């Protein structure tokens, strides 16, 4: 006999509950959410996004539209800026190491 008990529970979350869960996790977990969404979409994320935006417009869901636009309108700029900052930091680090190496010779 073991102390293990198995329990199977089925829970249906509302969109509001999913949004609250997403909002209350850290940015690293939010990134994992997007990574998993990408994987499970199997290439259909663009099409699903088109359906979602159509629903937002047809139902005049301004809160959804505003949230979606806020997140996604800036995402390309954030990604590019982040990559630029990492490159700049790497270049600065290499220059610092080169200066240190020159100073010791």
Image (cartoon, rainbow, N blue to C red):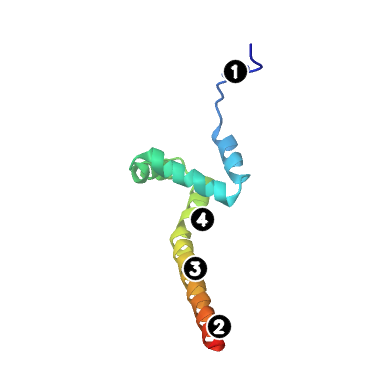
User: Rounded to the nearest whole Å, what is the CA distance between mark 1 and mark 4?
Assistant: 40 Å
Placement of 42 over or under 75, stated as above or below: above
Residue closer to the observer: 16 or 1 = 1
SS class of the residue under badge 3? helix
Structural crowding at the residue carrying mark 4, measured as other residues with C-alpha within 10 Å and reported as few (<14), some (14–19) or many (≥20)? few
Identify the residue under disc 1: 7
Q: Position of residue 43 (x, y in %)?
A: 33, 43
Foreground mark, 2 or 4, reads 2
Measuring 39% from the left and 44% from the top, which residue is drawn there? 49
Name the residue beneath numbered marker 4. Answer: 70
Q: How many marks?
A: 4
Q: Nearer the viewer, mark 3 or mark 2?
A: 2
In percent of width and height, residue 75 lies at 46, 58
Quadrant of the rendered image containing residue 10: top right
For label 3, the residue is: 86
Q: Residue at x 51, y 77 (%)?
A: 92
Please state, as top left, top right, bottom left or bottom right, where the N terminus lies in the image.
top right
Real-space Cα separation, disc 2 to disc 4, in angstroms: 44 Å
N-term mark: 1 or 4 = 1
Numbered tag placed on residue 100 in the rendering: 2
């Amino acid at each position: 006999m073991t102390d293990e008990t198995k329990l199977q529970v089925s829970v249906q979350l509302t969109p509001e509950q999913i949004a609250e869960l997403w909002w209350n996790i850290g940015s690293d977990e939010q990134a994992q959410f997007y990574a998993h969404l990408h994987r499970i979409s199997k290439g259909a994320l663009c099409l699903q996004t088109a359906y979602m935006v159509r629903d937002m417009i047809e139902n005049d869901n301004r809160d959804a539209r505003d949230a979606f636009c806020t997140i996604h309108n800036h995402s390309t700029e954030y990604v590019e800026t982040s990559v630029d900052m990492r490159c700049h930091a790497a270049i600065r680090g290499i220059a610092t190491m080169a200066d240190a190496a020159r100073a010791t010779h």
